[in-house]
Image (cartoon, rainbow, N blue to C red):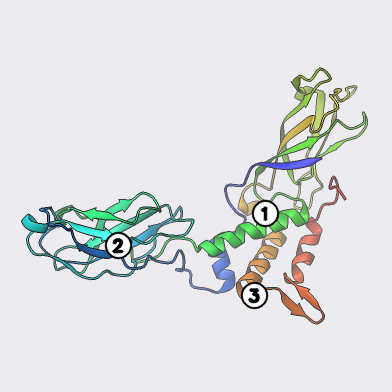
Amino acid sequence: MSLTLVTAPTTEPLTVSEIKQHLLINTSTGEPVPAVITVALASPAVAGNVTAGAHRYLATFVTADGETSAGDISAIVTVADAAVNGKVELTNIPLGGSAVTQRKLYRTAAGGTSYLLLATVSNNTATVYTDNIADGSLGAAVPTANTTADPELVSWITAARQWVESYTHRACITQIWDLKLDQFPESDDRIILPKAPLSSVTSITYTDTAGVSQTWSASLYTVIAPSGPECAPGHIEPAYNEYYPSTRSIPDAVTVRFTAGYGAASAVPAGIKSAMKLMIGHWYANREAVNIGNSTSELPLAVASLLWPFKSFEGVAA
């Protein structure tokens, strides 16, 4: 028997805001802002559209969550005469972390102090840009608040959910799995789907004795999906007076595709969320294992107590 994740959850049981509230840390913290950009007049000199005067530059990072506030401000670069040298070269544009998908570049108007949108760099790889934009074409002002999520907290939320799911043999948020078996059970046995709560069974496919892939009709079997926060795993059994098909004797001859999970984050039991908060709080405060007496603890002791009611043993290989 093997279990393979087909479609991972698209959300998490906890938000970054909830974790920040639990940790009592600043709600405005997120992706670190970019470092300084290197700026200089184009060389050799060339006419361009940058308005004559003194300009400064900065960048922001953009993630799926939002945009950082202003990064470090560059040195001044002065265009004396746009007809002679009206372009500015930006180099060493900072690269962001793995969550960053874009960078936005901002510039002051000639002699100004407000930073206005110059351009969007639609990747996290390019480090150079040539500014050839007049003041009148600059866009919106740089954000004053960092609306991105803290990338470290995001990774801890995912890690905590995965640990909880492994420990309890449950699925927190809706996800799709493939259960693979070498053969169907004996005629009166059930197929236990070892991820609770079971939402639905998409299909049951198998390789028949002739080596041909077949789909077992849903009308020939019954799906039992217990409900409730501490429910047992779901299972499949043949319908009345029906039997499991015969399969070829090969590994993974049977594949059951099913959907499991509580659904939306709001439906995940409070005990599971509380355990995740304790885990993340522990990781935040202790970046290594903690010695307690003569033992070493990598997690708060209350985590197991909170999760014990949700721990499932049925259908799990020893």
Please say if the residues under marks 3 and 2 sit with CB atoms less than 8 Å apart.
Answer: no
Who's the residue at 39% across and 62% down the image? 68
Q: CA distance from mark 2 to mark 1?
A: 38 Å
Q: Identify the residue under disc 1.
A: 268
Who's the residue at 29% across and 58% down the image? 105
**Number of residues whose C-alpha sits closer than 10 Å to that of mark 2, classed few (under 14), some (14–19) or many (20 or more):** many
Who's the residue at 18% across and 58% down the image? 42
Residue 119 versus residue 16 in the image, above or below: above
In the rendered image, residue 79, in percent from the top left (x then y), is placed at 12, 63
Please say if the residues under marks 3 and 1 sit with CB atoms less than 8 Å apart.
Answer: no
Q: Secondary structure at mark 1?
A: loop
| 27, 279: nearer the viewer | 279
Q: Taking 85 as reference, is 189 left or right?
A: right
- Which amino acid is tagged 3? Asn
In the rendered image, residue 112, in percent from the top left (x then y), is placed at 17, 68
In the rendered image, residue 315, in percent from the top left (x then y), is placed at 85, 45
